[in-house]
Structures are given as C-alpha cells and as structure tokens.
Image (cartoon, coloured by chain):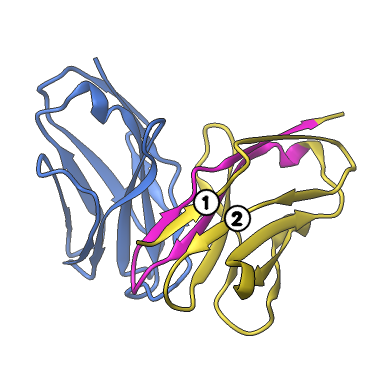
C-alpha cells in the first residue's frame, strides 16, 4: 500500500459525459501527478500540481482539467468523453516539487467510456 | 526528445532462473532512472532508482539494476526469479524537475 488513495476504482460512463476522479496523496506529500495508461499510448504524464499550484503539464487534452485543493487532495476532471479516453488513470504523489523524487502511485481508476 | 525503450515486450522464464530486463533511454543530461513493477489490477510500485553515485543499485525483492552511461542503459536483473515476480515492469526516466517518461513495459511470465 503506497498511501495514495484514488476513487472511484472503476467508472463506466457514456460518450459526451463528464467525470471526476479523485486522489488523496500520501500524508505530507505536496506534489500530485496524474498519468494515463492506455493500450495504444502506454503510460503518459498528464499534469503535476505542487501545493495547490500547477507545476508541469504533459500530454493533457483541453477537455481535461485538474486542480489541487488546500487539503492537498486533487481531482481530475474529464469532459466531453470519447471512446478513446477509456484508460487507467493513475495519481502519484511526492514529497516536494519533483526533481527526481520518488513518486508513489495509487491503485488507479479504470475508466470505461461506452 | 527524451524517450525510454524497453525492447522486450514479453519475457518468459522458469522459476529459479536468472532474469535481465533491458532498458535504454535517450536524455541529454544525467538522468534520474527508475524501475517500477505493476501487478495485475494494481498500481505501480517502485523497485529501485538511480540518481548518482554507485552505478549498481539495489532494490526491493532482490532486484538490482546497473546504470551504464556509455550504453544509455539501465537494465534490471534478478539472480533467481520467483513465481510471484510475474508482472509488468516499467523503466522510467525523470525529466527536468517533474515528470516521468515511461517505457512501454515488459511483461514477465514465470513458469514453475
């Protein structure tokens, strides 16, 4: 158990819908990262937040957005969902800003868009 | 551009045999290198990491990896594989101050 929690574990929804994935980092960690794992794209970095502020952006679609709240939990919002958004979404956390720190991964949220 | 290559998509070994999983990276500066393992239905667990110093890194579960700058490689090894090691293994490079770039993974199957 990494100490990172993600909810829900599974999510099934329809095209065009909007969903919110939630992540709670390990106690004391200030950074949260979001990754997408799909069969065709592999594991891809989406976005990082550090202490409430966006720090780095990767291959995140404009239909996707994230935020980190004062209690440091983070939410990833996916809107206008398409079939290709079906994937496993991981959240990870680290103590500081990154700089090669170990990232601890949650169990993931499996999203299925029908 | 930064990238990580894991040339072996699938490897099968017998229990008790030795294991080497290959990883090559492309990155202009000194990399931070990681190996993660993902069991079915699970998240990613860190096996080991290299930042600097000794190029042979010891990790959990009896795994080790060797950083070879001249070959841009960071291969993962284990002298004797257990059936519980069956999983998917990902090599990753830490880029800049934040994100990890992952390889495509190697699925390990272990036969009794």
Q: Secondary structure at mark 2?
A: loop
Are discs 1 and 2 less than 8 Å apart at CB?
A: yes
**Residue interval drawn in magenta:** B84-110
Q: Nearer the viewer, residue B37 or A95?
A: B37
Residue marked by disc 2: B23
Q: Nearer the viewer, residue A54 or A52?
A: A54
Regarding residue B85, the answer to whether it shows in the image is: yes
Chain A's colour? Answer: blue
- Picture residue at 70% right of the left edge, 60% below the top: B60
- Chain to which the residue tagged by mark 2 belongs: B
Indicate the position of residue A93 as horizontal and vertical percent values.
38, 61
- Picture residue at 37% right of the left edge, 68% below the top: A29
Indicate the position of residue B87 as horizontal and vertical percent values.
64, 38
Quadrant in which the C terminus of chain B appears: top right
Indicate the position of residue B26 as horizontal and vertical percent values.
47, 63
Disc 1 residue crowd, few under 14, some 14–19, many 20+, Cα 10 Å: some
- The answer to which of marks 1 and 2 sits earlier in the sequence is 1
- Chain to which the residue tagged by mark 1 belongs: B
Query: Is residue B109 left or right of B37 when viewed as pictured?
Result: right
Chain B's colour? Answer: yellow
Q: Nearer the viewer, residue A13 or B102?
A: B102
Asked if the magenta segment contains residue B90, the reply would be: yes
Asked if the magenta segment contains residue B108, the reply would be: yes
- Picture residue at 67% right of the left edge, 59% below the top: B75
Residue marked by disc 1: B5
Distance between the alpha carbons at the discs numbered 1 and 2: 6 Å
Query: Is residue B62 left or right of B55 when viewed as pictured?
Result: right
């Amino acid at each position: 158990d990494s100490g990172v929690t993600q909810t829900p574990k599974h999510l099934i929804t329809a095209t065009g819908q909007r969903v919110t994935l939630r992540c709670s980092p390990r106690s004391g960690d200030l950074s949260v990262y979001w990754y997408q794992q799909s069969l065709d794209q592999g594991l891809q970095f989406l976005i990082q937040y550090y202490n409430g502020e966006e720090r780095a952006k990767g291959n995140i679609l404009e239909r996707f957005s994230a935020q980190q709240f004062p209690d440091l939990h983070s939410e990833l919002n996916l809107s206008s969902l398409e079939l290709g958004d079906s994937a496993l979404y991981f959240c990870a956390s680290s103590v500081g800003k990154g700089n090669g720190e170990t990232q601890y991964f949650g169990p993931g949220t499996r999203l299925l868009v029908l | 551009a930064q990238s990580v290559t894991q040339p072996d998509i699938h490897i099968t070994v017998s229990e008790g045999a030795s294991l080497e999983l290959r990883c090559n990276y492309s990155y202009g500066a000194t990399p931070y290198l990681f190996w993660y393992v993902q069991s079915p239905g699970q998240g990613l667990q860190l096996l080991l990491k290299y930042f600097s110093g000794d190029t042979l890194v010891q990790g959990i579960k009896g795994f080790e990896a060797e950083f070879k700058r001249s070959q841009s490689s960071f291969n993962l090894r284990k002298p004797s594989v257990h059936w519980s090691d069956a999983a998917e293994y990902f090599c990753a490079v830490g880029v800049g101050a934040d994100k990890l770039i992952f390889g495509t993974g190697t699925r390990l199957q272990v036969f009794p």
